[in-house]
Amino acid sequence: MGTDSAPEAELEGAIQAARAGYAEVLLVGPQDRLSRELVQRKAQGLPIEIIHASKAVSMGDKATKVLRQRRDYSICVTASLVHEGKADGMISAGNTGAVMAFTKHELGALEGVDRPAIAQVFPTSKGTAAVLLDVGANVDCKPHHLVEFAVMGETYYRVIFGVERPRVGLLSIGQEEHKGNELTREALPLLKQLPLNYIGNVEGRDLYNGRVEVIVCDGFIGNVALKISEGLIEAVSSLLREAFTSTLSSKVGYMLARKALQGFKKRVDYSEYGGAPLLGVKGVCIICHGGSNPTAIKNAIRVAAEFSDGKVNEKIERDLAAASLGNPKGIESSGH
Amino acid sequence: MGTDSAPEAELEGAIQAARAGYAEVLLVGPQDRLSRELVQRKAQGLPIEIIHASKAVSMGDKATKVLRQRRDYSICVTASLVHEGKADGMISAGNTGAVMAFTKHELGALEGVDRPAIAQVFPTSKGTAAVLLDVGANVDCKPHHLVEFAVMGETYYRVIFGVERPRVGLLSIGQEEHKGNELTREALPLLKQLPLNYIGNVEGRDLYNGRVEVIVCDGFIGNVALKISEGLIEAVSSLLREAFTSTLSSKVGYMLARKALQGFKKRVDYSEYGGAPLLGVKGVCIICHGGSNPTAIKNAIRVAAEFSDGKVNEKIERDLAAASLGNPKGIESSGH
């Protein structure tokens, strides 16, 4: 029930995913309405089941109220399906803060994880993908949190994108080791010790040039980075649209180049990657943008299935243990 | 001597600025070479004077060595011209860290300024400009530094862009007051007390949508924001180029839309704004990108002249005093 066009995008995305055989889908929301919509869309034969939840969390809802009435709210019902093993993973395009809070509360954290983090996939100009984390689950991080993010992000990238030794970088303001703020300078020696393909400091521009696959940063900075990217893409699209419609000649030019430009759009389009996983919780949780279209929802379902089938969480726990990160406090004190 | 194509871009930019009547230009660098180049460019009649400096700071130079031999280095000679009142302002496209360090050392800070900051102008989709500061002069800022940035940025915007009450925002991860990190939450009540058009928290996307004119943030975040923008613009340009050259039809389409697309390019092009001023030093210092072209240098000279003529520094000192910020330590202790 979370997208701006709920439940349209969710329904269409679920139907497309079910048709593609990505997964059996449990749709959580108002039973009557969803049943009716499925019938209208002639989707009765598909492996889609409806789980009733009468309410959706709105911006005005207080967390305490939602927790008290958790059986009514779709996000809590969805998370409990995962917790009880009735679902292998969950997807939500609702308010990110709410999804995160209730999911963490319901599922708990993986062994060795102090701070679950949201990992956002960015398309690069090389045609590869780069993962940035954390993009908003944790502000004011400590150095050992960035270490957790590095291990979780690397594991996720390895499994989902099938790259054996993804490069891991620390988001900073220069490649030289002394450049950065207090947090990055303290995190750097800890990251160096990890059994990962750690390449040192990377800069903002490396998000898009394919130089690195996994980039770690504090959740405040990651969220600013994400929203700046979204804002710039919006601004560029709107200016391009203006340019193409400004003259007769440019309109004809657009018609001729349209097919190629659609390819361009597809390459910068986040929705191809589905949503952003909340890494570090006991279960699979993919958070989608509120503006998600059916394609984004469909792809999020695919990613959730791959996440579950690829046993990302088991591997994260193993990798954290291998990096001797069973006890984050131990790391922090040895790192200083 | 600082651009990637030095002294080409500097010479051409200086000639264009002198021709446009923006300023009398003092070119600082190797006398023989610059004289020869000016003659080749038939620029002898223009108000351009050469001031000799045999060396340019390179990446490998140590600060202590440069300071010891400061009479030889173009950046130090340039800054001392400003300090001695022989120049009204300076422009450099050299290594930002070096420009900043030697300029601050040579000129000192304005009354009431604890931390000079670099202000970068961004084009918005509305056709207006937004100024973000600090974009790299200060990492690990304290709340009262953001207050200084707000006052300096607002004054700069008012004078250079001729907007009477520019809107000032604090870069954060949500518009609600409780959203943000420790720094933004502590800075917020201080910013609210200023006699400015302060509109509260803004998000990354607001850099480009014209909702706000002056945005303040820690220099680490500002630098990441700047480089992400640069990286994304590069990626988008390269993908667009690929799209347009991918088929015969798209090539013809590009030809037809070219003029309109050049208008688009001009609107997203930073070089139209000249460089980024280092606000808060006793003098006018405009820092240009290493990749600056002659247009960027020309515009930086224009901005430096406007900065000087508009008495931005006098106004900054007055505005800081009016905001009772004569003593930043006083602010900090009252704010906690």
Image (cartoon, coloured by chain):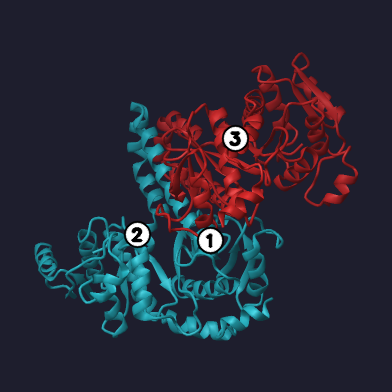
Chain colours: A cyan, B red
Is residue A11 found left or right of B178 in the rendered image?
Answer: left
Whether labels 1 and 3 belong to a single chain: the reply is yes
Look at the image and tell me in which quarter the C terminus of chain B lies. Answer: bottom right
The percent coordinates of residue B210 (x first, y second) are 43, 38
CA gap between label 1 and label 3 equals 26 Å
Q: Nearer the viewer, mark 2 or mark 1?
A: 1
Q: Callout 1: residue from which chain? A: B
Q: Which residue is mark 3?
A: B319
Q: Earlier in the sequence, mark 1 or mark 3?
A: 1
Residue at (43% x, 79% y) in the render? A312
**Image disc number at residue B182:** 1
Q: Nearer the viewer, mark 2 or mark 3?
A: 3
Number of other residues with Cα within 10 Å of mark 1, as a class: few under 14, some 14 to 19, many 20 or more: few
The percent coordinates of residue B128 (x first, y second) are 46, 33
Look at the image and tell me in which quarter the N terminus of chain B lies. Answer: top right
| Quadrant of the rendered image containing residue B253 | top left
The percent coordinates of residue B168 (x first, y second) are 49, 41
SS category of the residue bearing label 3: helix
Q: Which residue is mark 2?
A: A289
Whether labels 2 and 1 belong to a single chain: the reply is no
CA gap between label 2 and label 1 equals 26 Å
Is residue B15 found left or right of B299 in the rendered image?
Answer: right
Q: Does the image show residue A292?
A: yes
